Image (cartoon, rainbow, N blue to C red):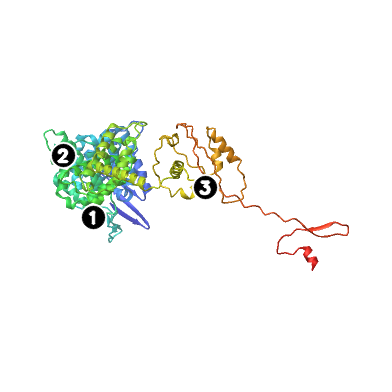
Amino acid sequence: MLVQTLGSKVNMLAEDDFGIVYLIENAQQFWSELDDVLRVPSDGSATLSMLDTALRRFVSLCASYHERFLQSSMQLEHACGLLLDSELFAFHSERMCELAIEDVKSKTDPHSQLILYSILLFYGRRQSDFLRSHKRWQPLIPLLMDHILVEIDTEDVYLGAPSISSGSGSRSSIVVGHIPIEAKLRSLGVRLLYEVCRVQKLSLPDLSVFSDQFIDSLFDLIEQTRFMPDETLNYSVIKLIVGLNEQFMVACLSNNQSKEPESQNRVLNVLMSRLGSSKTFGENMIFMLNRASRSAEDLCMQLLVLKLLYILFTNKGTSEYFYTNDLCVLVDVFLRELVDLDEESESLRHTYLRVLHPLLTKTQMRNVPYKRPQIIVALESLIQNGNIRDINPTTKRLVERCLGGEWCMQLRKTTHNKEALKREGDFRQCSPSHDIIASTTQDTVSSQAPASPTVEYDSASKALDLKPKLSKTSRSAESIHTPTSPRMPIPRSAIDTIRRPSTSAASFDGVAAATMAPKRRDKASSVDDVTAVMRPEKGSMNLPSTTSVKVRRPAPAPPKRRKPPPVPVGTTNGGATITAIATSASAPSLGQIGKF
């Protein structure tokens, strides 16, 4: 690639495999040239050779200018989208894919390999059947692994700046872009290999290509890229590891001769050999689970991560691999996802429930009571209201298994005992209500006959001082009380007595006596005896008896002050009498003034 400088313009010259020289001045010319390359005759005169040439010219043009016009992943995806939407893939996708795979295996130019791998990746995301073809991808897996194992300096990848080396003439070479082509190929190889492991089902012989050294290098790559500003590569490697773990799990379970499937899981064996040097893997895996969205890609990633967590929690050698703080964060994630997942993600909720049980019983969380009441509430909410909604039997079984854990049974037992003691303490400590005091006072007053009619009972001042006492047994009908009928409080005034209905004939006399009572009394401290007849409530025993209660009447209002009569002070010339009203005893009257 050469650069020609003319004033303020920079013209880039590039020659493809067919001997065609391109002169691109700006991005508009680049995208216009891509459209011309992808345009094929619409009259049906295009031959297979013309179609193959159009694909290879597209790859050559993108490989020549990708460091300037296809720097970001979005630009590269848009360019591949133009190819996939063209007539080349609309009507000849099988031939185009076979041609791209052949060129990947034969070409050694890394720039062309980058464009070809990108085309295969984006087409596989559109057509998942293409990624499931084991025959196509088996020869490509070792090539992708070689790109992943390339040693690259981290500082050159993300901290390097574009540099221009000037020469003696007008032509100079230029290096455009922050990331070397080897780093781009490594990142693309990780993403492609993860997509293949996500959709395919590999056997144990197929998985033999993934050696312990390769898996160990993946864990080292995670530790090397932990401080990079761009977390894409770090998360992509973690996805690849959990995808390989899924392949080993399925392959070991399918092998009936294996008595211990976990012993053949190379991902687990490598992780156990480096527990102290792979903490970033566990931290970022929980972080990815926490940041997962509801997209199809993230839902698949959550399933793969949860399956690896289940193996780590149930294995004695890795049950305490995570820090306690990380496990607390994981509990928070589980609480949120169990409640927030919709009905369409029921299988994912089942996976969360399957992993929650060993998380709380096999790890350090069995001795750390972190948000256990909230966990119980969240689990019980999944199986409540079965009369108005359908509850999945698997969900109910998994929830009951989690609630049947020792931590839950002990918490429920302790909570039940505390609630019982609290209720008993409230019953002992709380003071009786006003109705209980009034009924107790009524029973005490009615059971004890006064010694003389002059004895007064101040219910307003002594009611709170009285303590409930058991009344003495009596054979009279007046002392019989039914347990189902509540005791009525003592009436406070004659009006309250009048308002209470009664069926006994004696009560009319009491009402009449209360009604005919004088409104004004001479002595404010006198007490009138009013006989109040109490009628039992509905459902109680009707007894022909009355209860006599002495009630203090309220104090009367003070007498009104009357004005003195007018005092005659004299007569007029016509004989009329003149009077004056004495307003105050201290002021002299007119008559007295006339006497001076």
Residue at the right extreme, as displayed: 574
The mark that comes first in sequence, 1 or 3, is 1
Provide the secondary structure element on which disc 2 rests: helix
The mark that comes first in sequence, 2 or 3, is 2
Disc 2 to disc 3, C-alpha distance: 108 Å
Image quadrant where one finds the C terminus: bottom right
Residue at the bottom extreme, as displayed: 596
The mark that comes first in sequence, 1 or 2, is 1
What residue is shown with label 2? 207
What residue is shown with label 3? 454
The residue type indicated by label 1 comes to Thr
Between 260 and 547, the residue placed more toward the observer is 547
Question: Does the rendering let one see residue 292?
Answer: no
Disc 1 to disc 2, C-alpha distance: 29 Å
Provide the secondary structure element on which disc 1 rests: helix
Q: Is residue 54 above or below residue 4?
A: above
x, y percent for residue 24: 34, 49
Question: Does the rendering let one see residue 462?
Answer: yes
Viewer-nearest of discs 2 and 3: 3
The residue type indicated by label 3 comes to Thr
Viewer-nearest of discs 1 and 3: 3
Q: Do the residues labelled 1 and 2 touch (CB within 8 Å)?
A: no
The residue type indicated by label 2 comes to Leu
Q: Are marks 2 and 3 in contact (CB under 8 Å)?
A: no
Q: Which mark is residue 195?
A: none
Q: Which mark is residue 154?
A: 1
Disc 1 to disc 3, C-alpha distance: 106 Å
x, y percent for residue 255: 14, 34
